[in-house]
Image: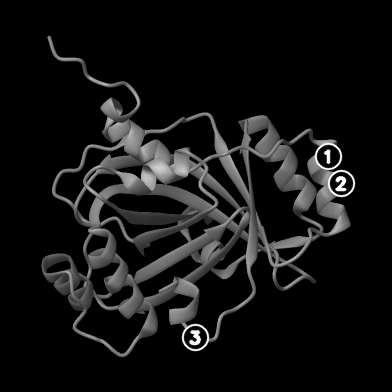
């Protein structure tokens, strides 16, 4: 059974374009989008206008989801649980997400749960609430694919929404780092930075980019780059996946 036939009321497929920026390019691009974009509410309320995003990604014990990603498989589904807090808090938001991708198009389904329901699932591989289609499909995939939480990725995000185009969103992700983990809030995690000097620009839209944005990308010489934070996190935490360990 396909994910897209299980979850009703699908929205439009979205497109994501990712770019790796130097600090200089970041300041140039941020200035260039100002006339067309405005700071989103999450960024506006955050200290220093950047908010934390922490995601717990699921994969098999032999990292098949990672292999599908690096092999460039067109059809794949990513599972993650996301929060916006660095420490456990009963009031912290926890968002459960399934991200289906077909080529460069993607569709994300998500729902929020409370801390007790999240912790129940982590310990039991089962949601105590069973009337939410996203939770049901998330649980089905976990059992069907034999998935386990494997890595955390976190970063500081700046988000911008378009002044005129509702479906357009632009984000800058700073200080991306990750660690192997089985929960969102591990004890004494050891995070490793991906690249301190790279800022990730993501452009997300439901249809073609507006002319001003296409011109901006071209004028600043930006090139689309594969930049899976999840894949980088796996490679950092499990280097033998890309550099096999040979026994004597």
Q: Secondary structure at mark 3?
A: loop
Residue in the image at 22% along x and 72% along y:
118
In the rendered image, which quarter contains the N terminus? Answer: bottom left
Q: Residue 164's spot in the image, x, y percent?
A: 80, 71
Q: Which residue is mark 3?
A: 8
Q: Secondary structure at mark 1?
A: helix
The reply, left or right, for residue 119 in relation to residue 159 is left
Q: Which residue is mark 2?
A: 215
Residue in the image at 78% along x and 33% along y:
221
Q: Residue 82's spot in the image, x, y percent?
A: 36, 62
The answer to whether mark 1 and mark 2 are in CB contact below 8 A is: yes
Query: Does residue 186 lie above or below 36 as drawn?
Result: above
The reply, left or right, for residue 192 in relation to residue 160 is left
Q: Residue 94's spot in the image, x, y percent?
A: 32, 70
Q: Residue 205's spot in the image, x, y percent?
A: 69, 63
Q: Which residue is mark 1?
A: 218
Closer to us: 198 or 66:
66
The mark closer to the camera, 1 or 3, is: 3
């Amino acid at each position: 059974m396909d994910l897209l036939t299980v979850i009703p009321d699908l929205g439009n497929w979205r497109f994501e374009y990712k770019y790796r920026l130097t600090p200089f390019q970041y300041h140039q691009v941020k200035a260039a989008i100002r006339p067309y974009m405005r700071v989103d509410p999450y960024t506006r309320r955050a200290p220093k206008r950047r908010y934390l995003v922490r995601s717990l990604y699921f994969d098999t014990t032999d990292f098949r989801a990672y292999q599908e990603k690096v092999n460039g498989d067109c059809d794949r589904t990513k599972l993650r649980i996301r929060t916006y807090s660095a420490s456990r808090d009963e009031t912290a938001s926890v968002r459960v997400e399934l991200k289906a991708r077909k080529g460069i198009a993607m569709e994300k389904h998500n729902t929020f749960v409370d801390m007790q329901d999240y912790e129940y699932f982590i310990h039991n591989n089962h949601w105590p609430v069973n009337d939410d289609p996203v939770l049901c499909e998330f649980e089905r995939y976990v059992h069907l694919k034999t998935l386990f939480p494997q890595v955390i990725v976190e970063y500081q995000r700046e988000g911008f929404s378009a002044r005129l185009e509702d479906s357009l969103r632009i984000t800058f992700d700073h200080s991306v780092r990750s660690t192997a983990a089985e929960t969102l809030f591990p004890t004494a995690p050891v995070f490793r930075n991906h690249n301190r000097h790279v800022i990730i620009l993501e452009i997300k839209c439901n249809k073609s980019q507006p002319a001003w944005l296409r011109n901006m990308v071209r004028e600043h010489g930006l090139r689309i780059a594969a930049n899976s934070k999840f894949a980088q996190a796996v490679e950092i935490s499990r280097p033998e996946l890309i550099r096999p360990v040979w026994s004597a």
